[in-house]
Structure formats: C-alpha cells, structure tokens
Image (tube, rainbow, N blue to C red):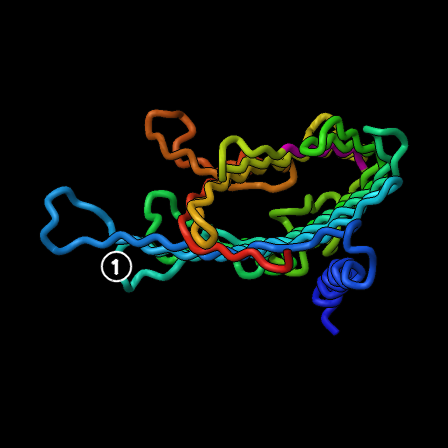
Amino acid sequence: MNPKLTLLFVLFLGFATGLQAQAEGDSIRWKRGGVASLGFTNAGYSDFWQAGGIPAQSVIGRINMFGNYKDSKQSWQNDLAFAYGLARQGSSENPFIKNEDRIELNSKYGYNFSKQLLISSQLNFRTQFAPGFKFNKNQPTTIPEDTISDFFAPAYLNFGVGVDYQPAENISVYYTPVNSKMTIVTIDEYRPIYIPQEITTGAVRYELGSNLTLKYRKEVAKNINFQTTANFFANYLENFGNVDVNWETLTTAKVNSWLAINFSTNLIYDDDIKFVVVQDDPATPNFNEERSGPRTQFQHILTVGLTYTFLQ
C-alpha cells in the first residue's frame, strides 16, 4: 500500500476511534460534532458595462469535525478539517485555479496537574489534496506556470509533550520544550523548495525544537464567533533564532441555521520554504536579478454560503 495513504489512514483511524468511543462510552464526558459548509461567489458583466469589471466565479467547501472527551482528571481533544476551493477570473476559457486546500488533524491529550494547568501531549498533521501552482503576479488569470506542491508534498507532522495553561475555557497556552517536527516531501522535484538540500536530500526532514501554541475563541456578538490559533516553532538543531510562524483566524457570522458568512486569514513564515523573487523595478541596480529566500505568506478568504451542523 502507498506509504503516504497508509499514514493518512492511520491518522484518520485514530480520529474515528475517538468518535466511536463516544457512542460506546459516557455521553456526558464526550462531545462530538461537525460543520459542513459550501460557499459561492459569482460576478458577471454584459458586453456593455461602462464601469468595467472582470467576471469571476469561485466555490469553497469545508468540513470540520471534532470529538472531545473530558472528566475530572483528563481531557482529549480531537479535530479534523478538510477544505478545498476553486476560483476563476476572466474568460470562461481560463482554468479554475485552486484557492484553498487543506487536510489537517489535531489531537491533544491532557492530564490535570492543577485546576488551570495540564500535562499535555499534542499531535498535528497537515497536508493538501491537489497540486499547487506558482503564478505570474502580473498575469493572475493565465494558465499556471509551475507545479510547486501536491498531496504529501509537503506534509507536516508535529508531536510534543509539554504543559497546557488554561486560565479560562476559551483560552489555551500550550508549550513544549521538546517538539518533534517532520517535513515530508514525497515528490523529488519539490524537495529543494521545502527541505534544505545541504541538510538532507531524502524525502523526510526531522527537526527537534521548542513549540508554543496559543488558542482563543469568543462569541463577540450574538451569532458572531471569532477563533484564532497561533503556532511558533524554533528548531534546536539548526538556526535556533529563526522562528516558524503559523497564525490562523476565523470569524463566522451565522445568518440563520443554514446560511453563514465566514472570513478566514492565515499567515505563515517558514525559514525553510524558499521563494524565487525577481527584482522588477528598472530603477534598481539589481534589476531582473533572481533571489531565493523565505517570505511571509498571507491568505484571506471571505465566503457566503450554506452551512450544515451534524452529529450534535
């Protein structure tokens, strides 16, 4: 069996086992559920539209599931997220371009050390469904130039043991001084983008470092919820002062039981992910020069669409 499918199956099986345990155990201690959403946008113009505009269509689907256990001494939190979206600008002959793509599993076990402090272990796995492309920023509606990512290329697996400070039900500060991080790139040609070749030319890079995860959620107004997760990782083995950052936010405004507005952001900085940048300002002395290095990545998505809550 394909090894990357095997790993994904094992991770999904572990999540499904937790959900099954709920049905067989004490329903008071277990909470489970999920939300599925499908969002659309469409803009169209006749041949005679004085203000001008570019036709555009997009669709984004998301599924989020959770299975959480809690008693007086311990807790186990699990969530699994899938997301995929496509967008097209301009002519109907232009291809649909991926604008969202995620497979992510989080699992955290905690044992109460005191009322607000838990001894915890945390696992995070993240990859994508489909190929990702590099585009010419000056021609965003054209055909993609190069493929730079795919399923399990890359994939990230983090595991650590540490302490989880929870001063309130909606706040978590998790820190582990010993966190194992694996970067997996199963397609050879993409490895130089995600794995420094002077460290390893193999499909897997191992890192050992310190990890801090901050989580916060709040109902800011009736039917309007905000949640955010920020993760910071520093590698002990190379360039310890360089911190990898992954910060996500999600704001959801529920119109009714089946219609919602979502606004999400994602900021990423990873010192090992290199981008080739061409200096395109003719006034600079290094005009047309190519440079490679890490860059701050940012994504924001606003969707209006159907939503369905299940298993609750």
Q: Is residue 298 above or below residue 18?
A: above
Residue type at mark 1 is Ser
Relative to 311, is 288 above or below?
Answer: above
User: In the image, what residue occupies the spot 42% across and 45% down?
Assistant: 255
The C terminus, quarter of image = bottom right
104 to the left or right of 39: right
Residue at 31% across, 60% down: 94
Count of marks overlaid on the render:
1
The magenta segment: 209-216
As drawn, 212 above or below 17: above
Magenta-span inclusion, residue 210: yes
Rendering coords of residue 303 (x, y %): 42, 47
**Is residue 281 visible in this depiction of the protein?**
yes
What element does badge 1 sit on?
Answer: loop
Q: Write the residue at 72% across / 53% down.
A: 67
State the residue in front, 72 or 93. 72
Q: Residue furthest bottom?
A: 1
The residue identified by callout 1 is 91
The image quadrant that residue 91 belongs to is bottom left
Instruction: Specify whether residue 200 is in view.
Output: no
Residue 221 on image: x %, y %: 50, 32
Residue 37 among those drawn in magenta: no
Using the image as rendered, state which of residue 238 and residue 50 is in the foreground.
Answer: 50
Residue 267 in the figure: left or right of residue 255: right
Q: What secondary structure characterizes most of the magenta part?
A: strand
Q: Quadrant of the N terminus?
A: bottom right
Q: Residue at x 73, y 65 (%)?
A: 9
User: In front: 236, or 122?
Assistant: 122
Residue 246 placed where, x, y %?
A: 62, 37
Percent position (x, y) of residue 58? 38, 55
Q: Quadrant of residue 158?
A: top right
